[in-house]
Amino acid sequence: MKYLHTMVRVTDLDASLDFYCAKLGLTEVSRVENAGGRFTLVFLCAPGDEEHARAAKAPMVELTYNWDPEDYKGGRNFGHLAYAVDDIYETCARLQAGGVTINRPPRDGHMAFVRSPDGISVELLQAGPALAPAEPWVSMTNTGAW
């Protein structure tokens, strides 16, 4: 057995792609438009994993956009996606500058949480050892839920 992907239902494909690709930094690997089933699937991977993802050898996120509106509740009940990042402070600053709320700031230099436009919780973990605690992150309180 091997892990392939996690599927997340989204209500606004453009807003979700802006979050996952433009802001979070994932890369679109493939897209399937199914007119008969009235849905679009978009497969995303972490930067540098594109070739492995195309060969189904790297984990991906599958965004599922159903063309007929549905009300997806929760987001937190899904759990979360998790990504290692090279510099958690730089990543959070870039996301914040892009309008993303940092729900759980990286006060410890190791872990932060943000949410997608559909309320999916995304955990960001510092690759390697935690960075030294630094402002403004140390003084920031949690915002909302993650």
Image (tube, rainbow, N blue to C red):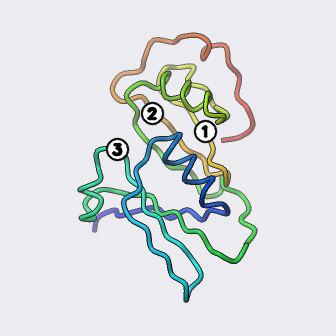
> Which of 24/59 is in front?
24
Give the label on residue 114, or none.
Answer: 1
Q: Is residue 22 above or below residue 140?
A: below
Please tell me which of labels 1 and 3 falls first in the chain.
3
Residue 75's spot in the image, x, y percent?
66, 55
Name the front one of labels 3 and 2.
Answer: 3
Q: Amino acid at mark 3?
A: Pro
Per the image, the residue denoted by label 2 is 125
The residue to which callout 3 is attached is 47
Q: Secondary structure at mark 3?
A: loop
Q: Residue at x 45, y 11 (%)?
A: 132
Q: Specify the label residue 122 is tagged with.
A: none
Amino acid at dot 2: Leu
**Left-right relation of 89 to 15:** left
* Cβ–Cβ under 8 Å for marks 1 and 3: no
The x, y position of residue 137, in whole percent, is 60, 17
Amino acid at dot 1: Val
Among the 4 quarters of the image, the one containing residue 135: top right
